[in-house]
Image (cartoon, rainbow, N blue to C red):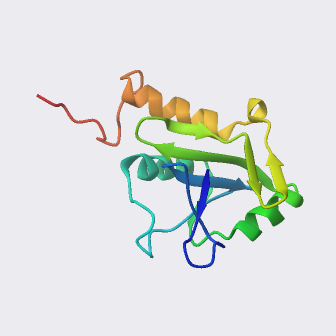
Amino acid sequence: MLWTDAFEHKYVQEIGTMNVFFIIGNTTVTPDLENGTILAGVSRDSAIVVLKELGLTVEEKPVSIDSIIEAHKAGLLKEVFGTGTAATISMIRELKYKDYVMEFDVQHWKTAPELKRRLTNIREGKSPDTYNWMLPVS
């Protein structure tokens, strides 16, 4: 479920209970934290850091559903995914807004799977945690 703002139902907020990211061309767009409706989170912040390391520009800004549909129609919307504590990265196969359906072939995606792989490897100790994200719990 893609949540939009409560007032205009124009701006994307979250996908399910996760932060949402859209890869449009070589830019990753995600709703900003300015209005206090989007939760700042470790998964979100970690994803932003790794996406930048993968060479993508990350823009945190208001994201209108109309801009997402326009990018999809133009063939520029490459990937859509959510970030959350339990799921880490969840790829989105379909979005529907009113009568417009956007379907995605997640089997051919490169960025979201690589992002998930890198975060999982850090979490599972298969890659070094150069960010000091992992803390021992006693």
Residue found at x 62% / y 33%:
113
Horizontal side, residue 112 vs residue 75: left or right: left
Horizontal side, residue 58 vs residue 24: left or right: left
Q: Residue 9 lies in what quarter of the image?
A: bottom right
Residue found at x 61% / y 50%:
1
Residue 118, given in percent of the width and then of the height, sits at 50, 32
Residue found at x 54% / y 72%:
6
Residue 89, given in percent of the width and then of the height, sits at 54, 38
Q: Identify the residue at the far right of this view.
A: 74
Residue 24, given in percent of the width and then of the height, sits at 73, 57
Note whether 20 is above or below 110 in the view shown.
below
Q: Identify the residue at the far left of this view.
A: 138
As rendered, which of 18 and 61 lies closer to the eye? 18
Residue found at x 84% / y 57%:
100
Residue 108, given in percent of the width and then of the height, sits at 78, 32
As rendered, which of 40 and 123 lies closer to the eye? 40
Horizontal side, residue 74 vs residue 25: left or right: right
Horizontal side, residue 40 vs residue 63: left or right: left
| Image quarter of the C terminus | top left
Q: Residue 27 lies in what quarter of the image?
A: bottom right
Note whether 73 is above or below 6 in the view shown.
above
